[in-house]
Image (cartoon, grey):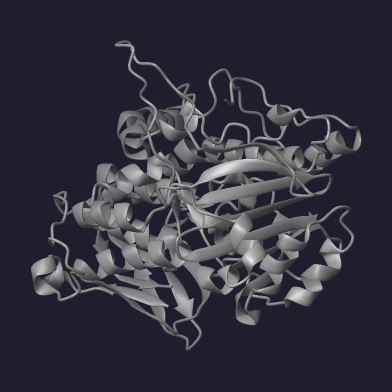
Amino acid sequence: MTVAQNNSKCTLNHTTNTNGLQGIVPERSAPTGVSVLIVGAGVAGLMASLECWRKGQELNKVPGDSFTIGPTAIRAVQQWPDMAVENEKIADSPWISWHKLNGEKISGPEPLRFNPTVSSSGKDEAPQRVYRHSRPAFHKMLSDQAERIGIFVEYGKRVTGYYESGDKAGVTLKDGEKIESDLVISSDGVGSKSSMVTMGREMRARSSGLAMYRAAYPVELAMVDPMVQERFQLLEDGTSVGELWMGTGMHVLFARSEDTMTWAMTYADNRDETESWSKLTDPETVLKVTATIPGWPEVANRVIKRTPLDRLHDFKLMWREPQPCWVSPNGRVVQIGDAAHTFLPSSGSGATQAMEDAVSIATCLGIAGKDNVTWASKVHNKLRFERVACLQKLGIFNQESRHRSVNSGNLSQSKSKGLLAAWIWRHDPERYAVENYVKVLAHLVDGMPFSNTNTPPGHVYKPWTIDELLSAKERGEEIELDGDWD
């Protein structure tokens, strides 16, 4: 897929896709002269194209259920006035309740709240809202904004390889065509060919021993069943409610909003299958799994049975080691989003970190300018890796926590640790890049000391591997999280 920018259409007044919005774009930085090629048009790629435009870069051509978007990404959205308005319209702020695997309620429902942080004036600085989005709606919002500034997506262009040479980098398409720019941003997701130039090999995935069934379908299909309608209700004010069911080796989420019924089941699975995000299955296959769960209620099966065949996905959850290097040797190819770092769904961080990446690399390029593109990508990598690795580890910790038995009534170990912590929501990737660019550059060039401050307070980052975490699990040990992750 290819996104191209027509530089003569960089204001909304020259486009028709306003969606009834005001057509206001943020102030654009002075042109840097840096040409950027962005591969992939998902959340990371589209956000990178918007932020690169805002920071004055020239976009060449850009080949190319629901999730939670954190405050760090929301701040980036709010830089764009029209998207700030649209985001409020399409976002949901669900409440959550905790349950055993038989559906018995442990606590809730209650609103999701960020951990409070009191300022010097005594005011709680924590954001007052947790945003959850429909993936298609959020993607459309980004895509529409890109079109309004003259960035368009052209599908059907398959990238078969990446390369860099001298002061340029590029991609080779299936038809043999080559496209070059000063910098190539790889945002084409898991299994990107860019790993061959950043790591010299493909990024190996390994089974986590878990898989997930996930579905989202029109709520009216579920509500025709009286039992489902009685169980899964909105609050009196119309707020949606999610139920998280947890038990040994499994957790399930049921969430009903005004227009969508969503459910996702993470379960033990040792099938030897290749990784796929598009494999479909049928409700009867899932019911064979639920039949093995003691006390599993009929109402849950009915939600599953109402799922349309084209809405039920089955995919293995794969682990990948944290990769410290996201850039090619000359710094002309840089990975962002899933191409650089994959997350388990339990991290609650994948989309947010992809957007943080987009803001960070665009900001570094804006500071560096055309003559220092190589250093911009390497500084960005240094600023981002340790934070991302911490959040990857947090996702694995939460996965293990949810799969411990909650029959002991120890709810504290079952709630997701750290996801609403201040060190996560308070971070501003744009300001962080501006404040630390020169420091990191001195660190990389002259060996000056530098320590990141966008990780948990008191945490000293140490490289870790999946094998280390699995070994601790086999010994019955909890994954170590030093410092204050909450």
- Residue at the image point whose x is 44% and y is 28% from the top: 443
Q: Quadrant of the image for the N terminus?
A: bottom left
- Residue at the image point whose x is 54% and y is 55% from the top: 233
Pick the front one: 481 or 195:
481
Residue sitting farthest toward the left: 13
Q: Classify residue 325 as left or right of residue 40.
A: right
Q: Which corner quadrant of the image does residue 14 belong to?
A: bottom left
Q: Classify residue 340 as left or right of residue 129.
A: right
Coordinates of residue 42 in the picture (x, y in percent): 44, 65
Q: Is residue 32 visible?
A: no
Q: Give the vertical position of 412 relative to 402 (above or below).
A: above
Q: Classify residue 431 as left or right of residue 190.
A: left
Pick the front one: 102 or 209:
102
Figure label count: 0
- Residue at the image point whose x is 80% and y is 74% from the top: 285
Q: Give the vertical position of 230 relative to 429 (above or below).
A: below
Q: Is residue 374 visible?
A: yes
Coordinates of residue 406 in the picture (x, y in percent): 79, 36
Residue sitting farthest toward the bottom: 175
Coordinates of residue 226 in the picture (x, y in percent): 63, 66
